[in-house]
Structures are given as structure tokens and as C-alpha cells.
Amino acid sequence: MASRLTRSNRAGWLFALPGFSLLFLFIIIPFFFAFWLSLTNQRLVSPNPAEFVGLENYRKLLSVAVVTLEPERDEAGQIERDSDGAIKYPRVRTITRNSDNPQYRGMGEWFRWHSGDNAKVVIASDVVFMKALTNTLIFALFIVPLQGGGALLLALLINQKLRGINAFRTIYFLPVVVSIVVISLLWRFIYDGDDGLLNSLLGMLSFGLFEPVDWLGRTDTALGSIIVMSAWQAVGFHMVIWLAGLQTISPTLYEAAAIEGSSRWQTFRYVTWPGLRNTAVLVLIVITMQAFALFAQINVMTNGGPLDSTQTLVFQAVERGYGKQDISGGSVISVVLFLLVLLISAVQGILTRERK
Amino acid sequence: MALVSAENRGLRLASRYATLIVVALVFMFPLVFMVVSSLKPDQQLLSDTSSLRAFLPVGDISLDNYYAAFERAPIGRFMLNSMFVTVTTVILSILLCSMAAFSFVFLEWRGRNVLLTVILATLIIPFETIAVPLLLFVSKLPWLGTDGVHWGWLNTYRVQIVPWIVDGLTIFLFVQFFKDLPRELIEAARVEGASWMMIYRRIVMPLSGPVLATAAILKCLKMYNDQYLWPLIVVQDEAHRPVMVGLGYFFQLQIAWGEVMAYLTLISVPVIAFYLIMQRAFISSIASTGVKG
């Protein structure tokens, strides 16, 4: 391809340099800066210069251990039970604060399960981070099929020849052009525990049988509520991408399928879906990337609560790095988040390539 | 027979439209609620949420919330700030990203492939992961003003504009588009002795309408709607605050929900209007990011 007409070192650099230097200054430098900061004890405002602390921040963030609690026994050696019949266990802090176990110092309970009469307790040095990590993964895991699948259904719905179909397409896309900050505030009214729109609707549909739920105020519904809202907001975006994919499939394939007498499901399974392969990969990657950046919804709707049930990695990174002025603490979460995104894109890359 | 099938077809058509309409309601109701509520006094707004009245402009309807909202916050200022930041960033972004992409696609120079790979690799860095280090970085950057050198970029327009000008996605969009332009055209112009600048301005840019629209629309949405976390941490003063951060004015001790709704309506209307006017361009923009990707 090299031709004397197009080779030009000087012009090449001159055209690329302004753009590249901005990218370098404002994305690449801060990116490596985050790695460096995560190895120090830098604070936003501090009288002392930052010190290099090595992997200490990572140890404080990522340490987990499993400890076993044996039931409390009375003098006769019988297992003690409370009034509900549940086994009584000693408190976790009898282990983490015991000077025999210096390695567990400062750790707290994350979750536990029972094995026989014993309780296995997973303790972590940074329980809030662990919750943020699992919440982020749960969010990504649920929003990918919900948003991607929902968008595909919408695309199939809108991809028919009907009068006025464009008006519907315009409406379905509408939430995409409204800021997620605005959307999140509006949905606080929908999810409100007393007279929220959702509770009123469910009450009407069930003729008053439905008990109002405080959707954002309960640990078991808050994250799910945010997942549904987030899927709703951006589903129109992915609908348009699916639609573009659908329109690249040759009509002759559908004609052939019709002549062969294939059912609607068969047509979808053997004509439509294979034609959407590349689109599916793109939708999958875009939704996953956005899922890991979850911040505004949390900031506007729940602030991570109730009881840390909606903490996310980005929310914690910002809260620590900016809110608590603990720059190194925020950076270490950022680096972990980045490595996670890298890992997941690599896995997705391999999985989607192999199938070709 | 024919009658029955015509009736069937009518029924099927009706059920299709019914589905489309129900889905449309699902996507519209929060926005209808927003606009309708902005016209109601607080007490009525809150009590109406228990019935369908929430979506109807009934009862004590007025523009009072809008007047009150303008009293409470310098809304005009916030809107101007956001629009200034958005327009400036979009223009500079299109210019610098298209120039870089032009160089990557049409020119051959040492280091080109490495640089392009680095740029595309930045696509997987979520902005949120670099927000805090970037904050530390920009708080110490110099700026040459008319009255000498200033240190620190906090509480300015430039801190909201400069870091957002160039991004991997915009460069990528231009690269994809330029690859499909006929190379013979460029080579012929070179033979004629045209400079690279001339080729960029007179040949490539005039052919780039579709990708310019795509890049501009995506950047507009990003700058106007999604600028929340970054200005939240780098802009504390009122004079430079954008619309999304301005919301904070309405969340002091006693939340006046009617005013909140009026404010939300005001800041959303410009984008929605822009979208409705240009909706073909919007949809085909998003679609074009997908087809080649």
C-alpha cells in the first residue's frame, strides 16, 4: 500500500498530534496516575507528602478469609438455642479481635452460611467494597439480558411495515435523549413507598390487594428497581442498533424461508439470529461497559443505601476519592474496576471470536 | 371466506397497534408525569400520584412553579453554561478527531499503527475510573490567560471542555467512515499537487456529512446530558455550573417538588426539541455506530 503519494511523516504527525496530545494528557496520563496513586497513601489535602506504600491498599481492599464459628454450648455441652430455636453463635469479633489471630484484625463479617452445627463466616477487610463489587456484578449480569433482550424485542416489534411506525420508534427512543439524572429523579416518584406511581398502579390492578412496597428503601428491592429503570432508559438506544442489524439481513433469505414453510420461530432462529451475530457482540459489549460505570442513578436515588445494598464500584471510588478525600483509596478501586473491565472484555472477545 | 379473513386481518392489525401503543405509554409516562406535575402546586402534585390524575393537567394548573424556579436558581446562567460547554466541545472534537482520523487513514507515517492502537485501547477505560486522578491533575495544570499564567483549572469552563474534546469513539467513527471513501480521489489530488490541508478541507470534509452528524449528535448528548459526575467535583462556583449540577439548588431543606419538575422540564426540553426536529439524523447516527462496529 505504501505509495510515495501518501507517505508523509511530517504531515502525518501534524494532523494527528493535536488530537493525540489531548487524549494523552487527559486519558492516558490520569490512567497511569491512578495506578501510581493506588500504591501510595495520597490524600486530596494533606500536610504530609504522600508515601509509597506498595500493595498495602490492595491488601486492605481485597483481603477475605473464612472463619468457622462453633455453636455456644452450656455447661452440659448442649448447643444453646434462642427462643426461635436458632443456634446461638459467639460474635465474629471474638475471632477478629482475638490477639491469637492478628491476620484477621480489622476485618468484618460479609456473609455467612451454615454447615452442620457450625457457621462459616466470610470476613473481609473492606466489607463495603465487597458489597459494591457484588452489586456491580449483579447489575451487569441482569441488565445485559434485560436491556439487550428487551431492545431486540422492541426492534422486532418496530421492524414491521405499518402506517405510523416511525412515530412509535421516535417515542421508544425518547428516554435515551433525556439525561439519566432527570430520569432517576422522576423514577423516585414511581418507586416511592407511599403513593408512588408503581404502588398505585399495582394497587389498581389488584383491586387494592397489593401492599405498597418502598421499592428503593428495602434491601431486597432497591438494586432490582435501579436495574429495571436503567434498562428502561437505554433500551431504545440498543433497539436502534438491533434495527440497523436487522436491516442488513437480505430479504431474499426471508423469502426463501417463507417458501420452505418455516415457522416464525424457525425463521428467527435460523435466518434472523445468525444475521445479527455482529450486532449481538456490539450490544453485549456496550451494555457491559456501561453497567460497570453505574454512578448517576445511585447518586440521585439511593446514595448506596439502604444498608449498602446499592453500593457500586464507581460510587465507592468517587465517595472515597472525592467525598472522603482519600485519593489513594479511590484510585485503588478504580484500578480494580479497570482490571475487571479488561478481564471481562477479554473473555467476551474470546467467547465471541471462537463462535465464528 | 374472504370476509372472515379480512376481519381477521383487521383484528390482527388492531392487536398490533394495541401492542405498539401500550409500549409507547411505557416509554412516555414518566415524561408526561414530569410536564404535567410542573404545572401543579406541591400538595396536589403529591396527592395526585395515587391515581391517574398524575398524568392529567387537572385541578389547580398554573405556571407558578416556573416563576418560583427562576427565582430560586440562576437557571438561565446554568443553561448558557451547559450550551456553551456543549457547543465548544462538539466543534473542537469534530475538528481534532477528524484531523487525527484523516491522518491515520490517508497518510503513511512512522508510529501510525502504534498510536491508533493506543487510541482504540482507551475505549475500554471507563471515564469514572480516571475521574479522581484527573481531578488531582487538572487542579495543578497551568493556563495562560491574558494577565499571565494561572495555576489550577478548577471552577472554569476549560476544565469542563478540554478533557472531553478527544475520545477514542469519535476518532474510531471517523476512521471507519474515511476507510470507505475512494482513495483514488485523494491520490489524484496529490498528483495534482494539492496540499494535505487542502485535501482535508476541500475533499474529505465535504464528503463527511453523515459521520459529522453522528459524531456531533453523540457528543452533544454526552456533553449536555451526561456531564454530572465531572462538574460535580470540579465546578463549585455558580458562574460555571452546568444544568445537571444546578439541580442541587432544589434539594435544600424543604424540597419543592413542583419547582423540581419545572426545572427538569426546562432543562430537558432543549434536547427533546432538538431530537424531535432532527430525529431521522439521531436514529441513523446511532444505527451507523452499530452497522460497522
Image (cartoon, coloured by chain):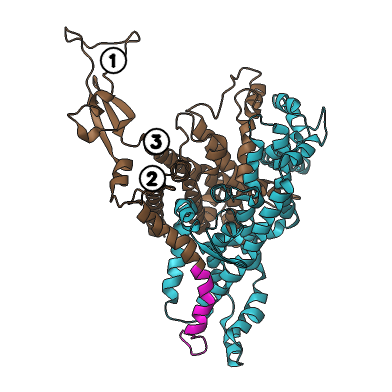
Q: Main secondary structure of the magenta part?
A: helix
Q: What label sits on residue B30 in the rendered view?
A: none
Amino acid at pointer 3: Val
Q: Chain of mark 3?
A: A
User: Range of the magenta residues?
Assistant: A1-21
Label 1 or label 2, whichever lies nearer to me, is 2
The residue drawn where x is 51% and y is 35% is: A303
- x%, y% of residue A253? 57, 60
Q: Secondary structure at mark 2?
A: helix
Chain A shown in which color?
Answer: brown
Q: Nearer the viewer, residue A69 or A138?
A: A69
Q: CA distance from mark 1 to mark 2?
A: 38 Å
Q: Percent position (x, y) of residue A269? A: 51, 50
Q: Earlier in the sequence, mark 1 or mark 3?
A: 1
**Residue closest to the eye, A307 or B184:** A307
Quadrant the C terminus of chain A occupies = bottom left
Q: Residue at x 42, y 39 (%)?
A: A132
Closer to the observer: label 1 or label 3?
3
> Label 3's element?
helix
Q: Which residue is mark 2?
A: A329
The residue beneath circle 3 is A128
Query: Which element is circle 1 on?
Result: loop
Question: Is residue B271 inside the magenta stretch?
Answer: no
Looking at numbered disc 1 in the image, what kind of residue is underneath it?
Ile
Is A18 colored magenta in this rendering? yes
Q: Earlier in the sequence, mark 2 or mark 3?
A: 3
Q: On the image, numbered disc 1 is attached to which residue? A: A87
Read off the chain for label 1.
A
Q: Is residue B32 above or below residue A217?
A: below
Q: CA distance from mark 1 to mark 3?
A: 27 Å
- Viewer-nearest residue: A51 or B121: A51
In the rendered structure, the residue with mark 2 lies on which chain? A
